[in-house]
Image: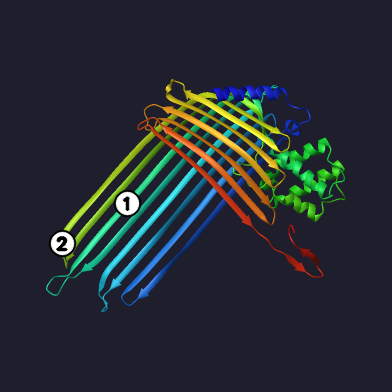
């Protein structure tokens, strides 16, 4: 709880001291709509066979998969809603037949094996975030439901011949077994929250800043962008991933609109970005970090209530037959079959207070914090969950990234094994990338885990990882290009 109080105090202080010229603070989510419909089907079939004088073997298999998806989204700085539906069906099967013979041609074994499996799933989800007034007061609602069915069937039919000697009678064995397993899982969840504050994903501002710096260094711009031009570039970058929902070649359409924006701003040299500047823009803005590269700004604090329910039904069927015969006489016969079912239901209700705080400090630093304290509405002893995390990152140019993260969680739940658990971990990372030459990664982490029930278990662990890579090369094409020696 102290951590949450600290986050809340920081959020209130920093929200009052935001600088008016801060491009991260000025960023607004552009009003845009999108939808996407998708359908796919794939199938395969194959097999193999072997034939010899004393045996023959044939195996065949096939599989198929089909999916259907639909998504609608409206996003803006005031309201966001989305609806998504996805359905998937998958199945496969195989047949195996084996026939063994004596050298003279008499049959010694006939084996038939059949296997089938199928899986179907449906997911439906909807959520909405709404700021009904000019004040940063938000209402959020999310609902989701899933259905997942999994079935498997198998059947083995085996006839085989036993003949132990000249003074015994030939015996035929017949083993027949079959099984069927099925599990059917339904889940549903609802989340409702209301609170004060607003958190925006401002990663696009970071990307737009790097693009402008690159193009100024490449002499693709005659001057820095205007404030409005910089804001429009960040807004365009923020919807870059959405181009793929309307275009088969989204990058071509996106960079066409970027060039149009630069021309309208009056900063572009010529009518188009030259090939070098365009390809330089396509390079990754930052290189991979274990702490991520996303950047957010703002704070949010308010109550939250969630409810989830799971229902599982499982069924197993088994049957077997064993028979031994001598010519037309049945020497042994046994048959068995059975069905077992299992039904499980579980629900979980959790209400509490959540806090988020995110603050970019210039173009290169980022501070983040989050916390949650929740309990079951009928009492703290039924279920209590307290969580908190803090993270700091710094981008030194395009090549160096350093950062650290710490988080802990305490959960107490009555009536379940390991119902009193506390865990904490911390990590620091240093990432370095030098294009075409060196790469370096160093990460250090520490974890602690404690259980009060049933055995008072305490576990500590630590890990340090180090990675280094080196590449060097050259390129010569006399009369075509100057010799290339990267970073010589």
Q: CA distance from mark 2 to mark 1?
A: 25 Å
> What x and y, as percent, mark residue 278?
77, 52
Q: Secondary structure at mark 1?
A: strand
Q: Quadrant of residue 14?
A: top right
Quarter of the rendering occupied by the C terminus: bottom right
In this rendering, would 102 be left or right of 421?
A: left
Residue 137 in view in this figure? no
> What x and y, as percent, mark residue 199?
65, 30
* Label 1, residues with CA under 10 Å away: few <14, some 14-19, many ≥20: some
Q: Residue at x 31, y 75 (%)?
A: 54
Residue 179: numbered disc: 1
Q: Secondary structure at mark 2?
A: strand
Instruction: Give the answer, above or below, for where 234 lies relative to 320.
Output: above
Most foreground residue, 249 or 302: 302
In this rendering, would 319 be left or right of 344?
A: left
* Label 2, residues with CA under 10 Å away: few <14, some 14-19, many ≥20: few
Instruction: Give the answer, above or below, for where 110 lies relative to 443.
Output: below
Q: Which residue bears the numbered disc 2?
A: 330
Q: Residue at x 79, y 55 (%)?
A: 276
């Amino acid at each position: 709880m102290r951590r949450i109080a600290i986050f809340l105090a920081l959020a209130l202080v920093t929200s009052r001291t935001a600088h008016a010229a801060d491009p991260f603070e000025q960023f607004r989510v552009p009003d845009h709509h999108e939808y996407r419909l998708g359908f796919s089907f794939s199938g395969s079939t194959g097999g193999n066979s072997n034939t010899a004088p004393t045996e023959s073997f044939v195996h065949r298999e096939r599989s198929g998969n089909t999916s259907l998806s639909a998504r609608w989204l409206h996003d803006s700085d005031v309201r966001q809603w989305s609806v998504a539906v996805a359905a998937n069906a998958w199945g496969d099967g195989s047949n195996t037949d084996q026939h063994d013979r004596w050298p003279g041609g008499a049959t010694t074994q006939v084996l038939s094996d059949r296997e089938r499996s199928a899986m179907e799933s449906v997911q439906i989800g909807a959520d909405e975030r709404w700021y009904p007034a000019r004040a940063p007061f938000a209402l959020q609602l999310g609902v989701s439901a899933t259905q997942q069915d999994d079935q498997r069937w198998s059947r083995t039919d085996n006839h085989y011949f036993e003949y132990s000697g000249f003074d015994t009678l030939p015996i035929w064995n017949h083993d027949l077994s079959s099984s069927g397993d099925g599990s059917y899982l339904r889940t549903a969840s609802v989340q409702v929250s209301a609170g004060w504050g607003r958190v925006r994903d401002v990663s696009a501002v970071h990307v737009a800043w790097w693009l402008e710096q690159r193009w100024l260094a490449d002499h693709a711009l005659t001057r820095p962008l205007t404030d409005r031009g910089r804001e429009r570039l960040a807004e365009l970058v923020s919807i870059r991933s959405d181009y793929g929902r309307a275009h088969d070649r989204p990058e071509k359409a996106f960079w066409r609109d970027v060039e149009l924006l630069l021309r309208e701003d009056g900063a572009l040299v010529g009518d188009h970005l030259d090939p070098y500047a365009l390809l330089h823009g396509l390079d990754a803005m930052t290189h991979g970090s274990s702490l991520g590269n996303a950047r957010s700004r703002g704070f949010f604090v308010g109550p939250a209530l969630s409810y989830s329910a799971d229902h599982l039904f499982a069924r197993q069927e088994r049957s077997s037959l064993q028979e031994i015969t001598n010519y037309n006489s049945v020497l042994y016969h046994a048959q068995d079959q059975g069905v077992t079912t299992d039904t499980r239901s579980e629900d979980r209700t959790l209400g509490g207070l959540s806090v988020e705080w995110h603050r970019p400090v210039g173009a290169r630093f980022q501070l983040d914090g989050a916390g949650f304290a929740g309990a079951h509405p009928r009492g703290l002893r039924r279920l209590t969950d307290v969580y908190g995390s803090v993270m700091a990152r710094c981008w030194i140019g395009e090549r160096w990234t350093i950062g650290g993260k710490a988080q802990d969680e305490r959960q107490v739940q009555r009536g379940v094994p390991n119902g009193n658990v506390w865990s904490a971990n911390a990590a620091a990372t240093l990432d370095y990338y030098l294009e075409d030459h060196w790469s370096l990664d160093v990460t250090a982490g520490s974890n602690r885990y404690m259980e009060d029930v049933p055995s008072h278990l305490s576990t500590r662990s630590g890990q340090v990882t180090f990675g280094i890579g080196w590449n060097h090369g050259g390129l010569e094409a006399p009369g075509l290009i100057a010799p290339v020696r990267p970073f010589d």
